[in-house]
Image: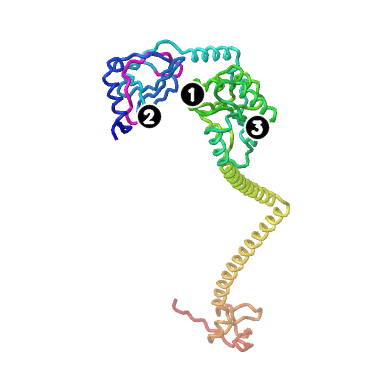
Amino acid sequence: MAGVYSVSQVNAYIKNMFAQDFALNRISVKGEVSNCKYHTSGHIYFTLKDGLGAMQAVMFASRRKGLTFRLEEGQQVVVKGSIEVYERDGRYQLYASEITLDGTGDLFRRFEKLRNELEEMGMFSPEYKTPIPKYAKTVGIVTASTGAAIRDIINISGRRNPYVQLVLCPALVQGAGAAPSIVRAIQTLDALHLDVLIVGRGGGSIEDLWAFNEESVARAIFACRTPVISAVGHETDVTIADYVADLRAPTPSAAAELAVFDYHLFEQQCIAAAQQMTKRMEQKAEQYAYRLEQFRLRLQLHSPQSQLNERRQYLEDARVKMARQMEKKVSDLRHRLELVCSRMDGLSPLKKISGGYGFVTDADGKRVETVTGLQAGDTLTVRLPDGRVEAEIWEVYQENLPG
């Protein structure tokens, strides 16, 4: 059909038109930076806007050498580059080759002014911060009833601890009337005496998050008796509510993790603590049992019965030692007696008599060993093994024996 073109053909045609336009190839655009994102690849994606419109822009990593500052929300800048059509999506954007500061945007100036004023009042001081309870049972939530923020909080809370009660007070988080709505929600939940409040929303531009930069919201958070966790936008987004709150969470998901304790981890910690306590009790019991045994032994050692037993044992040892010494003494004496008996036996007249000799005594009973002094007519007694003989001397003969 004549005059019918494909989408890619139209996009290619428009891209070619932009490429041939000299003004679009070398253009400088002034505006306020919004929704600035630094990609992991090094590219910078942001929106350039003024009071009437907005334009998507990107600065590739290869062009960042000329950027002498960090691009942030609210900055008023002049961007030099080219406007081209991204053919795949059919949209145009500003490809930046150079960015210079041109002052600070109105919203950012308002943000800094209020932040400085509240800081001078002491509303950001640490001494006014209330600790977040470690084991909260009831958690109030101030955010939109629909959106990623409430879904993330519900999902993470249910996963971490299904027993924690979540109380949602829906509020407008963007646009006209958002600030009063947030204030009413904070006051309503504060009156319920919950354990902790989460106040926040998902990410967005500085305009989208502006309700959390309003002084009324900051004062409502400061006056809240319930501990407040601020969870506005992404990690790089900072609002006045973050400064006033008792604790800032980088995202709503992180706020849920900070507010709701992990029940399964808590259960494991309780089990581990119980086991450790049981182990310590057993160790203590063993120590006291050992000490008790030491005291018992010491008492037994110093008890009268123990000392009496010790004395009895000493006497018994002395008795055994004395008996052993007496037995040895008797044995030594018996041995000596045997020696004496053996010697006496060798000198015994009876033994000689039994060998064929006789034991001769005179009338006075004295032993006669020589004929000297004997005379005829004297009487002698001769003892033999089986008796004795009384004899009278008839004659005495003296003999000289060789010797």
Residue 215 lies in magenta, yes or no? no
Alpha carbon separation for disc pair 1 and 2: 17 Å
For mark 1, does the 10 Å Cα neighbourhood hold few (<14), some (14 to 19), or many (20 or more) residues?
many
Image side of residue 330 versus residue 79, left or right? right
Is 176 in front, or is 299?
Answer: 176
Return the residue at label 2. Answer: 40
Which residue is painted at 53% across and 36% down in the image?
152
Return the residue at label 3. Answer: 195
In primary-sequence order, the first of circles 1 and 3 is: 3
Give the quadrant of the N terminus.
Answer: top left
Q: Amino acid at mark 3?
A: Asp
Mark 1–mark 3 CB contact (< 8 Å): no
Residue at disc 3, secondary structure: loop
Tag nearer the camera, 1 or 3:
1
In primary-sequence order, the first of circles 1 and 2 is: 2
Q: Position of residue 349 (x, y in %)?
A: 57, 80
Q: Amino acid at mark 2?
A: Thr
Q: Colour scheme in the image?
A: rainbow
Q: Position of residue 390 (x, y in %)?
A: 64, 88
Return the residue at label 1. Answer: 237
Magenta segment range? 70-89
